[in-house]
Image (tube, rainbow, N blue to C red):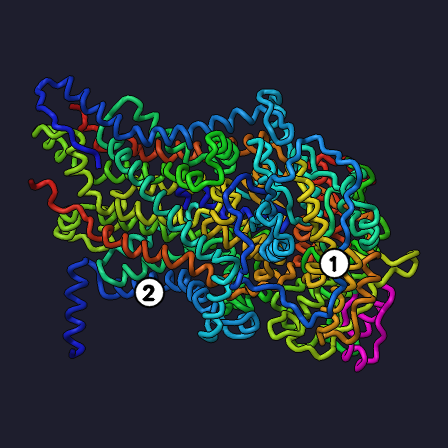
Amino acid sequence: MARPGMFQRLQRAARADGISIPGMGLRVLVLLLFAIFFGLPLIWIVLAPTKTDTQLLDWPPLAFGSLDRALLAWKNLFGYGENSVAIWSRNSVVYTISSLLLSIAISLPAGYALAISRFAGRQFLLWATLISMILPGSALVLPLFLEMSLVRLTNTPWSVILPAGFFPFGVYLTYIFYATSLPKDLLAAARVDGCSEFQMFYYIGLPLARTLFGLLIFIAFTSNWNNYFLPLVMLNDDRLYNLPLGIQALISGTSALRPTFATDLPIRRAEVALAGLLLIVPVVIIFLFSQRYVVSGALTGSTKE
Amino acid sequence: MVATPNTTIVTRQPSKRRRGLQAAHLFVLPYTLFLLLFGIAPGLYAITISFAKFVEGRPQLFQAGLKNYTIAFTDFRFLKTFGNAFSFLAIALPVGVIGVVVIALLLHARDDWFANVMRTIYFVPGAVAGPTLVLLAIFTLDPALSPFRFLLTAMGFETISDVIRPKYFPVLFTIIGFFGGAGGWIAIFYGALNSISHEVLEAARMDGCNAWQSAWHIKQPLIRPYIAYMAILTFAGNIQLYAEPALIGAAGSSPISLWSPNQLAYEFAFRIGNFGASAAISLVMLLIGLIGAILVLTTTSIFQSDASNSAEG
Amino acid sequence: MSTAFFTRWRLVCLGLLLTLAACAGAPAAPTAAPAAAATAEPQVVVQTQVVVQTSEPVVVTAVPQPTADPTDPNAEITVWVDSTREGAVKLYKEKHPDVAAKINISVVDRGQFPAKVLLFNNSGGGWPDVVFAEPELVTQVADASRNFPADLMPFITTDILSKFAPGANDPCMFDGKLFCMRNDLAHNVLWYNAPLMKEFGYTVPTTWEEYEALGEAVAKQHPGYVIGAFGDDQAMNVYFWASGCPVSHLTSATEVQINLSDPRCTRAAAMVDKLIGLGVLTKVGPFDPAFVKLANDNKLLMMPAASWYGEYVFGGKPDSAYYKEAKGQLGVALPPKWKDDPKPLTGAQGGAAWTMSRHTKNPKLAVDLIIWLTTSNDYQGTAPTFPAYLPAADVWSKTVAANKVYAQDPFPILKEAASLVDGAWSNVRYSKGPVFNTVVIGGLTEDKTVASSLEEFQKQLTAEAEAQGYEVVNK
């Protein structure tokens, strides 16, 4: 590849996107700077399980320790209790997937209807949704707990899954999405052809929402996967904990973060960092998976039936 | 999904609309149920118990009159915490919204693998939580240990106590909040940008728009509803700041006293045992958040600009 | 990103944890993790253990069972512990297989204990039966809105109580009721580096005045060496508690004395200001990486700190914080006293207890468990920290003596110092530590002296106390 050829290709690409070559360079530079801001701490976390406490203090922050230490961290974490960490991981998966399915199944049709039709109670729903997102969570702790204990669901997985099915953020996002990107004439045409509302949703609304779907998946997954407070309020039995709650319970009883608790458990900073990675990796995987939908969901040519 | 009933074609307008309305109600029914159970009912309960007296933690309804409000509003930390929250909001809201929009537009300027990689990197920090986040903060904010230590020492900081000082809290919390929260919104905005019809963008290119003009004049206005959405939630969320002050308390030498109104609300609820006063503070936070929401909505009128205009029969 | 509920409240627990306390228990949940041989569980490091006297203290429950609630000797109990103490309860189940099935263990973050009790009060059920918590947490759950602990007095014989270290159970006494029993003590003692002291030709101070003079000498003759830390709320316990300063002197259940202009406070402030100015008292806390480095570099000449620092911070093991090798370098001495004080006083940093719920359906089992946990040689003999029950402490001393990091057997000093904790400094419902950090430590970073911060410290402490319903005297 001769240099002129590469440069010409670059020029052609630049012209196609309407951006000059210095502009491309500026864009790359700015985005890379942000990547350093977001990414450097992540690299630190990935490397932390390989280092002992002393190495973490003495060595350069991004030095690599030893694979042995990382493997030991894994052993220490999963060796704690009676498979506690494995059980918490399984619980997290179950709760998160259930909540995700429930919340998307409920929110998608709701947001769609809010966007495309005027019906009695629509304004009320929109405002109530907005307000419930703005209402501070601290006010909801007691009433939610009481509701669940009324139906004897506290300390069961349902107490964590059901409230998480309420996904106002998703409803509103869906509403905005359909409101801005669903072509009005498409729906009108479908109605003229005699489609029922359900058919329209199924044959038009859903396929066009690939992007939205991608967004909803990673948002719902991340917030449910990381949910700490709801399980804290609802669950008492440590076999039911999800991963964030369990890790917190484990680490708060050890000296990993601050040596203020004397303990013989082998939980140190490496283990804390590894626990963090356990929480991060699935989120990344789901994000990458959902991005396929986001990227491929561009609305093209849908009005030309 | 929903089983599609075999509908007969009706030519009369009114019944078609009625059928449309009924369908819409079915669409929103499950959500409405959940909204009632987990949104409205708890909210109403919170308002109700703000007028309750508490005996052994249990509410005696309507026996406190306005006493809880008095207790909350005259607490020596009430004004201070709200002042703190506003000083944080003043920095964090513009930085957050502008930062996210700019990054999303930059990412979307070219459809390349580079943008995809960057977007993923920006998103991952949102998944760091709990003790790991504390650990990260302990190390990242310490000028002796941080990967950013060259930056920190260049700014004159030598120990972590130099960094974690109350006068820096608004900036610190902005940075931490951006670190954890920006990626999600960036991904959402990117998705929103991707939903813009290619034809619109093509047409703009044809007309001679370069990438910057397209971003500013075409893309940004089209994603304004999303920007408004983010502004509303960020406004309310900033007033309800909780995680970052708690994090700093855990990461600094040791716990610090209450900094944000939400911490005060938790203090009333779970330390003092007065859920009523806590609810009073929550209502104030809600009110402020609502004012922000109304401000944003009236200036962008997103409730009007939707496809429902064409849904009438 | 404020998407689903509570995403932002992830760190509620940590904040509360570091200030306060515990979590409350669980109702009929089908856990019963059987006490089968937990193979993968990392157990307490058992060092060469000398054969112990076999008979456990005989539990003679006091004659009248003063329970108003109907009790059921077959009811299950739920025990809330932290991850470190989980092994202790499992050990009890191993030793008592006939009741093992009735004991459910849940590992919790006890920072949430007071909050959970409030929730259970509202739902009318679900309280744990036995909880491992610091006396500060017990104080919180003993308040009017929670009313959690049961009075253990009727169940404990005076014989058992008398064998605890003097004053150990004082923080558990509320108006004559015993709301908890101490698990361990964390009294402050004076640690020092014996070889360094010998090399520099210094004698170990017995008074704070001597300590101050030593600091001056060190600053002049051996700059770079430190004799203590003043960077977090441990400093408050080390220097102010030991001086008898009225930060939280309860005069009754609802009245507290806070008076920071008292000479007992100002003398401590003057001393630390002097030493901080000289640089022999660091402005960073003992767990700050910078301080740990000082210790690793053997620049730590002396340090007043809690009794558990010996095993867990100085350590002498490769993954210990301060001393990576056990070379007999760690000496310990009684905490210094102020010259004019009649007797030495010291503070403490931690030390937890076991408390029982007054809602428990099986108090007999719960009390048996608590007594075993606090007094048995099987557990306390190998516990991480200094047992509050002195006969068990005697057994514990053997595990400590095996650690080669000590210059001499630390146990006699630790034992004597255990009775020196100033009982006037009470557990209260308002948080002293965070206010101290914000005002005093925060003031240090702004280059204010400790003495000049005392007035603001007093003001904020008073406000916090009043917000918790106390009446403050000697303002």
> Is label 1 in a helix, a strand or a loop?
loop
Judge left or right: residue C346 versus residue B96. Answer: right
Number of dots carrying numbers: 2
Question: Hey, which residue is sitting farthest bottom in the picture?
Answer: C199
**Picture coordinates of residue A42, whole percent (x, y):** 42, 63
The part of the image, by quadrant, that contains residue A291 is bottom left
Q: CA distance from mark 2 to mark 1?
A: 60 Å
Can you see residue B88? no
The image shows residue C326, relative to residue C443, as above or below, that is below
**Picture coordinates of residue C218, whole percent (x, y):** 79, 74
Residue placed most toward the observer, A197 or B200: A197
Residue placed most toward the observer, B41 or C38: C38
The chain ID associated with circle 2 is A
The image shows residue B176, relative to residue C427, as above or below, that is below
The image shows residue C204, relative to residue C345, as above or below, that is below
- How dense is the environment of label 1, judged by Cα within 10 Å: few (below 14), some, or many (20 and up)? many
**Picture coordinates of residue B119, whole percent (x, y):** 32, 57
Instruction: Give yes or no for residue C461 being in the magenta stretch.
Output: no
Magenta region: which residues? Answer: C190-219
Q: Which residue is at 56% across, 27% downward?
A: B50
The part of the image, by quadrant, that contains residue C475 is top right
Q: Which residue is at 83% across, 56% downward?
A: C419
> Is label 2 in a helix, a strand or a loop?
helix
Q: Which mark is residue C387?
A: 1
Our reading of the magenta stretch's main secondary structure is helix
| Residue at image mark 2 | A29
Amino acid at the residue labelled 2: Leu
Q: Which residue is at 54% across, 62% downward?
A: C41
Q: Which residue is at 6% across, 40% downward?
A: A305
Looking at the figure, which quarter contains the C terminus of chain B?
top left
Nearer the camera: disc 2 or disc 1 = 1
